[in-house]
Image: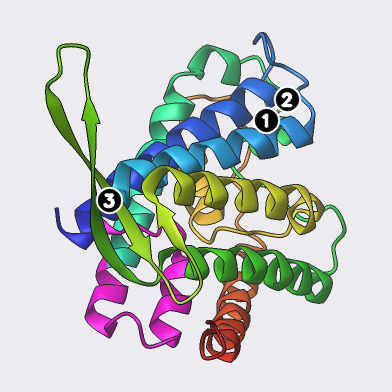
Amino acid sequence: MTPFGAELVACCVFALFGTAASCAAVLPRTAAHGTRFATLAAAWGAALALALFVGDRAGAHVNPAVTLAAWMCGCLPGAELVERVGGQFVGAFVGMALAAAAFVPQWSRADPVVASRALWRTPEVDAPLATIAASAVGTGAFAFVMLRIMVGEPIVEVDEAVVADGTVVAREFVARRTPFILTHRAEGALLAGLSFALALAGPGATGAPITPTLGPCGRLVHRLLPSRSKGRTEWRGTWLSFAGPALGAALAAFAWRATAGSAG
């Protein structure tokens, strides 16, 4: 699978499950209506873990900030950067559109101002510089963890097991050796999901974006929703979805370069 295809599939899975959880929590007449934000953060973390596990064989990053940080570290060519980011935005749009479509009856019964939070979040306080700072901290910490997990050469380990009838069965495990640790696919995906949930529940709780794709794609999906009562699509502040995560990617790349050389 090409990098574009891997990112498209992985981001679609991530956005589909994460947005579905947000819609279920925000929109009325759902079993999960009123779910606490910490639970939502855990759901988004689980969605990321699943997406990374699905796209791991092609090295999906899912988050453009992680891709940008990898490029800044010199671990990714420029052409692949563009290809991956393109796949991430297309996949996020498709996943969010599918999730929103599953809740069409609820959209017509929702408060437009409140319902928009299912597809994008605005900062809790109108302070752009503070939002950028919070976004940079959250995204930078998450991207740094991702670099430590993902940047490295994939290796294959073979383990032999003896079943009941005495037959020897060889099992293959794909792992990735980084300058810091050796992670298996499932372990890396779970660690990434945990770090994303913590970043979202921490700095992200202020409304600061951690993933650049969700804000713009969520607004576009909202604009195309076939519901007359959905309210107005608010594009103001969309630029914050890019400014903070880009700065966070730079911080993550700097931290990775500063620590990779000293890894034993």
Q: Residue at x 79, y 28 (%)?
A: 36
Asked whether residue 176 appears in the rendered view, the answer is yes
- Disc 2 marks a residue whose amino acid type is Asp
Q: Which residues are magenta?
A: 58-83
- Quarter of the view holding residue 43: top right
Q: Residues within 10 Å of mark 1 (few under 14, many from 20)?
A: many
Q: Residue at x 68, y 24 (%)?
A: 25
The answer to which of marks 3 and 1 sits earlier in the sequence is 1
Marks 2,3: beta carbons within 8 A:
no
Disc 2 marks which residue?
111
- Disc 1 marks a residue whose amino acid type is Ala
Above/below status of 67 relative to 207: below
Q: Residues within 10 Å of mark 3 (few under 14, many from 20)?
A: some
* Viewer-closest of 213 and 66: 66
Is label 1 or label 2 in front?
1
- Disc 3 marks a residue whose amino acid type is Val
Disc 1 marks which residue?
115
State the separation of the CA atoms marked 1 and 2.
6 Å
Task: Give the number of marks.
Answer: 3
Q: Residues within 10 Å of mark 2 (few under 14, many from 20)?
A: some
Residue 237 drawn in magenta: no
- Quarter of the view holding residue 162: top left
Look at the numbered disc 1 and give the secondary structure of its residue: helix
Look at the numbered disc 3 and give the secondary structure of its residue: strand
Above/below status of 24 relative to 11: above
Q: Residue at x 59, y 90 (%)?
A: 258
State the separation of the CA atoms marked 2 and 3.
47 Å
Is label 3 or label 1 in front?
3
